[in-house]
Image (spheres, grey):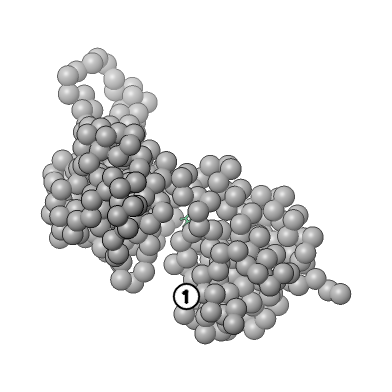
Amino acid sequence: MDKPRILVARAVFPEVVSRLAQYFEVENNQADEPWSKQQLADKLRDKVGAFTTGAERIDADALAAAPHLKICANMAVGYNNFDLPAMTARKVLATNTPDVLTETTADFGFALLMATARRVTESEHYLRAGKWQRWSYDMFAGSDVHGSTLGILGMGRIGQGIARRGAHGFGMNVIYHNRSRLSPELEAQCKARYVSKDELLRMADHLVLVLPYSPESHHTIGAAELALMKPTANLINIARGGIVDDAALAAALRERKIAGAGLDVYEGEPKVHPDLLTVPNVVLTPHIASATVPTRKAMADLAADNLIGFLVHGKPLTPLNPEVLG
Ligand code: 8YV
């Protein structure tokens, strides 16, 4: 019997491709060529399953070109690259990779917070440029992390991981805002206090964004919100580009309306707003919050297990729209 045909849209660990090849006829992209929307649609035409990353948009157009498609397994916890209602209407299962990246991503959120607060990259650039001639009392003096107020916007699993690190590791006063409040047990574990969004903006010394992107969360942080923050505060975005108005943020950084920012995600990435590239008080990383070898491997394995689980055994591990399972 012919094996089901699947597409692995991006380069991924060869052993994961080999494992998939035991069950499927795999068309892969180990050369990691950038495909246009049309090329992706053409490649999906004869496939029943697809292994995707956050960079592949699966919308009504892509679905219309893929009459046999039954599942798209995203190697990401975020799934704003999926038009989930369109997929559900077409009875295409969507899966993501929750849990396996929580602690790694929370580690990185904290790394970016600390690098921003203590001006790590700005001072490194100074040193590498040969500008360091002698010590001075205020050279790259930043803000304290220990004992400060940590604000978290979006208190899912990763937000909770950051809260635990802040409260238990650094003695921070943790406040958060979320669509729904945590249970008293989880609030106690995270030592986190629920506040309104305005209070969060006004009180945080370090504000970390960890909320999912959707049309509703577009530009959650713009000029008006930045104006509410303390001039000494830092903003950290490890969530998604588009949650922050990057032009407004660059202006706020330049005018020192806030002290600094640490960004791992950007509007329209991999493009970065040119103004962000010229302000000194921002730490910029290329969407690497989940990038450790074991975590990326666990994410790829979970996406593969979703394809095998669903197409071979009828049981996906982490479905996003289980209603299509009937
Ligand atoms: C991925 C992410 O690296 O999981 C997510 O939502 O943002 C990252 O971990 C990226 O989306 C690639 O798929």
Residue 53 visible in the picture: no
Residue 39 drawn at (x, y percent): 61, 71
SS class of the residue under badge 1? loop
Report whether 222 appears left or right of 299: left
Q: Amino acid at mark 1?
A: Asp
Q: Classify mark 1: residues with Cα within 10 Å, few (<14), some (14-19) or many (20+).
A: some
Residue 81 drawn at (x, y percent): 47, 67
205 or 117, nearer to the observer: 205
Task: State which quarter of the image contains the C terminus.
Answer: bottom right
Q: Is residue 275 above or below residue 83?
A: above
Q: Is residue 216 above or below residue 268?
A: below
Q: Residue at x 34, y 46 (%)?
A: 189
Task: State which quarter of the image contains the N terminus.
Answer: bottom right
State the residue lying farthest toward the front: 185
Residue 115 drawn at (x, y percent): 33, 35
Q: How many marks can you see?
A: 1
Residue 215 drawn at (x, y percent): 34, 72
- Write down the quadrant of residue 243 in the picture: bottom left
- Write down the quadrant of residue 94 in the picture: bottom right
Q: Where does label 1 land, which residue? A: 83
Q: Is residue 35 above or below residue 293?
A: below
Q: Residue at x 31, y 58 (%)?
A: 182
